[in-house]
Image (spheres, helix red, strand yellow):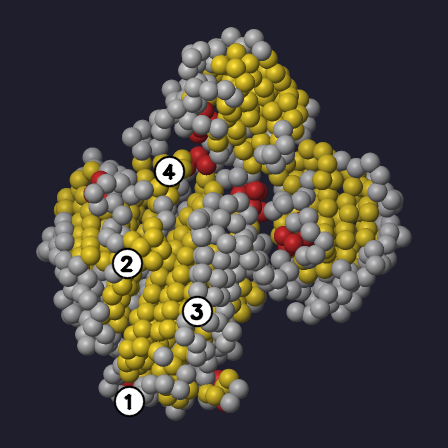
């Protein structure tokens, strides 16, 4: 956005030793037992469980390191008292033993505490004479949550634990036959008879859908309960193709199996089996069919003791408005207008909305879309929802200037615009996806005021795309009737109908194909009226919209397999749901987080609707993703909190090296903000350590206006650091950070479209100097990198505090045959400062009040 028109320290480990400590009894009702050498203890309950902390020293020492089972990774806190580390066991447990493996920065005084809810705590052990090493503690207590609460550090550093282990047993004495722990859980099978009888049909709670296998022996059906459970009963509702011989088996890891029940004389019908065992996974393992067909189950139900299951699905909340074709146009328009009046100029407010249209035809409406508002169709394809009217973004609220029209979206609808064109006058963070425009697409506000940066994907425009005053735009995997004009930087990849590359006159950059892409997961309604989340498949060398000529390839996941989060949900609750195996859907709202959301399971979908905003409160990361295949992150806004976070979102731990080319993680329509809505700080917004990650439309923004803005107020070094190899970024918007906006350390990186503004507010050149050079390159490819390629990349300056500043260059890269750039540009906005070179020492100076780009067709 522009306010002017514009075309660790080394390990400190010590030898392990037993704690010899004075024990403090803090309550007559609390039994505190002096530590003893480890004896017979219960099951290890804490490993891999959701873990949070009061703080972390840096991004490399997150809370989860203390429960990952590795003695080479650690959690460490900030250098202050008190601090805590908390683990969610997933269910109420009887705890008999706790082991703490301290790093050299240990606790002199700490307590071990339990809680049923993560709020009210009971102390089961306390010492004021800790001496580090390994503390093996025999304790007695119950609770779902357990924490180490440190009150006095033994060193000048924080608290640091290699491992935090909790032992005990979960579950009560009664069998909960009212709660089917298998319903809606992820299910897999050895085979399926056809596409109409998938594994998930046996755990969907319906006796009218079924799983059936191939006609062969053996076959199995497996369900993932999400966490280790005490299983007391299993019910199988057989279809006519039943099992003569089968076993019921459990497993902790899905590999080694224990048999709980077996029969060789099955007679079909309904089998109610009383069993006793524990495990995360349960399966029916059939060894002999009773018919010539396969095995077929209407339903597999699993019952457990002790509860602990978090349900999936549920209400989408009060800020999701759903419209039906049976509603009158006047009723729909009234609700749309009410939302727009609230959101039109509500740039930094807390209200969030999703406007959802069920399949069918709608006439005579004009949906004007304001801040933090998503409009979406609930069909399988865009043309299932047909709007005979308008979906509009204009800039009347800002006197016809659209350079601050952020944070809004439209997806999955067909529009028959009333005037022959749809107006979508936006700048950053305003995705336009899976839209079918029967006419032209106008990218400028009424009166042709400025707009600055937009994104189009997987869409069709039967008429022309009309940039008018829109300065830069990226479109991918779409079909258009052509372009009317171009201003500074128009980039297309895989767009049928796009003009050929002619940069800089006119400034079109066109790739015939998009090297790797996928569209975002989206909500839709199936034939029964139930919510599903569709997860599109990955495309390579894509051309055109994925849905033209048929449905988008991919898979559907029922909403029952999602934890539906609402404002007020804690990170601990969300992590427990994720650890249980649920996906995650954030409903509209603001989510203050006192812990890090940890996504550890491959292929987890984390989807936001209506711009849900995650704000870390205590200096931790808002979210971390393990180095696993296929995680989908989409539709989220990360807002920096008042205490500096080392990173807001981290994908993969430091030093990961596994390849994920067959099933990459994707980050789509994910936005970051430092300041603006309030004082916020974060050293880096996004760190990508995993390989093959697809970054598909992000905006990382250190605020230049709003509340909590200033050179020493909303501090932030870098927007994006890429350490993983083979990472692709499509539509990369990163602005105003105080050092490099982007640092690219990974090999074989690709960037298609980059839009950047340098920080507005360096107080003077001396305050913004990198070595002997004034300023930091906006985009830096690290010196060791030998392979990188970028297309259509622009950087602008507007030094409004000291207009005499002249940044040395906008792009910095090693000179290597495999490092290539195409179609670069720099701009001085209104002559407020200068950029001396485009890349390295090459390119003319961007300067002067005419706001004319300096263009460089290729480098080297």
| Category of crowding for the residue at label 3, using alpha-carbon neighbours closer than 10 angstroms: few (below 14), some (14–19), many (at least 20) | some
Q: Earlier in the sequence, mark 1 or mark 2?
A: 2
Of tags 1 and 2, the one toward the viewer is 2
Of tags 1 and 4, the one toward the viewer is 4
Under circle 2, the secondary element is loop
Evaluate whether residue 710 shows in this view: no
Q: Earlier in the sequence, mark 3 or mark 4?
A: 4
Q: Are marks 3 and 4 in contact (CB under 8 Å)?
A: no
| Disc number placed over residue 848 in the picture, else none | 1
Find disc 3 in the rendering and name its residue. 787
Q: CA distance from mark 3 to mark 4?
A: 37 Å
Q: CA distance from mark 1 to mark 4?
A: 54 Å
Q: Are marks 1 and 2 in contact (CB under 8 Å)?
A: no
Q: CA distance from mark 2 to mark 3?
A: 20 Å
Whether 77 is drawn above or below 850: the answer is above
Under circle 4, the secondary element is strand
| Disc number placed over residue 556 in the picture, else none | 4
In this view, which residue lies farthest toward the left? 419
Number of on-image labels: 4
Q: CA distance from mark 4 to mark 2?
A: 26 Å
Position of 680 compared to 823: left or right?
right
The quadrant in which the C terminus is found is bottom left
């Amino acid at each position: 956005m522009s306010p002017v028109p514009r075309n660790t320290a080394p390990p400190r480990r010590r030898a392990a030793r037993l704690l010899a400590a004075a024990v403090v009894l803090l309550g007559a009702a609390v039994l505190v037992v002096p530590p003893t050498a480890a004896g017979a203890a219960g099951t290890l309950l804490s490993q891999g469980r959701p873990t949070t902390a009061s703080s972390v020293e840096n991004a490399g020492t997150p809370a989860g390191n203390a429960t990952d089972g590795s003695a080479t990774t650690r959690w460490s806190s900030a250098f202050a008292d008190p601090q805590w580390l908390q683990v969610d066991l997933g269910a109420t447990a009887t705890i008999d033993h706790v082991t703490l493996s301290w790093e050299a920065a240990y606790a002199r005084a700490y307590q071990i505490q339990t809680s049923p809810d993560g709020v009210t705590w009971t102390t089961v052990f306390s010492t004021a004479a800790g001496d580090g090493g390994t503390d093996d503690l025999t304790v007695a207590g119950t609770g779902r949550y357990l924490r180490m609460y440190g009150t006095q550090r033994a060193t000048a550093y924080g608290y640091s634990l290699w491992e935090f282990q909790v032992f005990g047993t979960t579950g009560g004495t009664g069998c909960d036959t009212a709660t089917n722990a298998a319903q809606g859980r992820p299910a897999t099978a050895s085979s399926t008879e056809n596409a109409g009888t998938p594994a998930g049909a046996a755990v969907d709670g319906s006796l009218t859908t079924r799983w059936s296998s191939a006609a062969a022996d053996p076959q199995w059906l497996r369900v993932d309960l999400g966490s280790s459970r005490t299983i007391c009963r299993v019910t199988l509702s057989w279809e006519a193709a039943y099992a003569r011989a089968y076993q019921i088996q459990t497993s902790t890891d899905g590999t080694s199996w224990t048999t709980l029940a077996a029969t060789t004389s099955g007679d079909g019908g309904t089998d109610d089996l009383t069993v006793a065992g524990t495990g995360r996974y349960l399966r029916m393992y059939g060894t002999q069919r009773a018919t010539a067909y396969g095995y077929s189950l209407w339903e597999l139900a699993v019952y457990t003791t002790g509860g602990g299951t978090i349900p999936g699905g549920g209400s989408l909340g009060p800020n999701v408005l759903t419209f039906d074709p049976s509603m009158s146009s006047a009723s729909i328009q009234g609700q749309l207008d009410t939302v727009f009046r609230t959101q039109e100029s509500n740039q930094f407010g807390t209200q969030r909305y999703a406007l959802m249209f069920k399949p069918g035809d709608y006439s005579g409406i004009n949906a004007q879309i304001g801040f933090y508002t998503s409009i979406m169709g609930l069909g399988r394809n865009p043309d299932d929802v047909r709007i005979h009217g308008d979906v509009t973004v204009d800039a009347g609220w800002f006197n016809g200037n659209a350079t601050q029209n952020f944070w809004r979206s439209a997806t999955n609808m067909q529009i028959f615009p009333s005037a022959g064109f749809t107006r979508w006058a936006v700048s950053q963070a305003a995705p336009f996806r899976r839209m079918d425009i029967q006419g032209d697409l106008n990218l400028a506000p009424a009166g042709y005021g400025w707009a600055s940066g937009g994104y189009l994907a997987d869409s069709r425009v039967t008429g022309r795309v009309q940039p008018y005053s829109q300065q830069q735009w990226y479109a991918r995997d779409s079909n258009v009737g052509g372009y009317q004009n171009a201003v500074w930087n128009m980039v297309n990849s895989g767009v049928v109908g796009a003009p050929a590359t002619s940069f800089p006159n006119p400034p079109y950059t066109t790739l015939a194909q998009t090297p790797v892409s996928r569209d975002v997961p989206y909500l839709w309604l199936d034939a029964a009226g139930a919510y599903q989340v569709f997860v599109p498949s990955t495309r390579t060398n894509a051309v055109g919209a994925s849905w033209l000529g048929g449905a988008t390839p991919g898979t559907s996941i029922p909403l029952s397999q999602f934890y539906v989060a609402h404002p007020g949900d804690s990170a601990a609750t969300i992590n427990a749901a994720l650890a249980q195996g649920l996906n995650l859907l954030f409903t509209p709202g603001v989510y203050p987080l006192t812990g890090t959301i940890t996504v550890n399971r491959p292929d987890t979908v984390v989807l936001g609707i209506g711009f849900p905003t995650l704000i870390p409160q205590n200096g931790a990361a808002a979210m971390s993703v393990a180095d696993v295949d296929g995680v989908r992150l989409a539709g989220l806004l990360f807002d920096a909190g008042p205490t500096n976070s080392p990173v807001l979102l981290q994908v993969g731990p430091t030093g990961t090296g596994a390849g994920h080319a067959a099933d990459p993680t994707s980050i789509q329509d994910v936005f970051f903000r430092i300041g603006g809505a309030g004082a916020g700080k974060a050293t880096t917004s996004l760190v990508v350590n995993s390989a093959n990650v697809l970054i598909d439309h992000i905006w990382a923004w250190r605020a230049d206006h709003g509340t909590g803005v200033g050179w020493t107020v909303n501090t932030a070094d870098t927007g994006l650091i890429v350490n993983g190899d083979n990472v692709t970024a499509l539509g990369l918007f990163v602005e105003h950070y105080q050092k490099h906006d982007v640092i690219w350390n990974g090999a074989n990186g690709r960037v298609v479209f980059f839009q950047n503004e340098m920080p507005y507010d360096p107080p003077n050149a001396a305050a913004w100097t990198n070595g002997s050079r004034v300023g930091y390159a906006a985009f830096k490819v690290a010196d060791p990198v030998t392979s990188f390629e970028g297309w259509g990349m622009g950087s602008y300056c507007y030094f409004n505090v000291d207009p005499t500043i002249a940044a040395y260059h906008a792009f910095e890269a090693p000179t290597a045959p495999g490092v290539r750039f195409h179609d670069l540009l720099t701009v001085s906005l209104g002559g407020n400062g200068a950029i001396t070179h485009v890349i390295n020492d090459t390119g003319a100076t961007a300067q002067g009040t005419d706001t004319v780009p300096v263009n460089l067709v290729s480098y080297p």
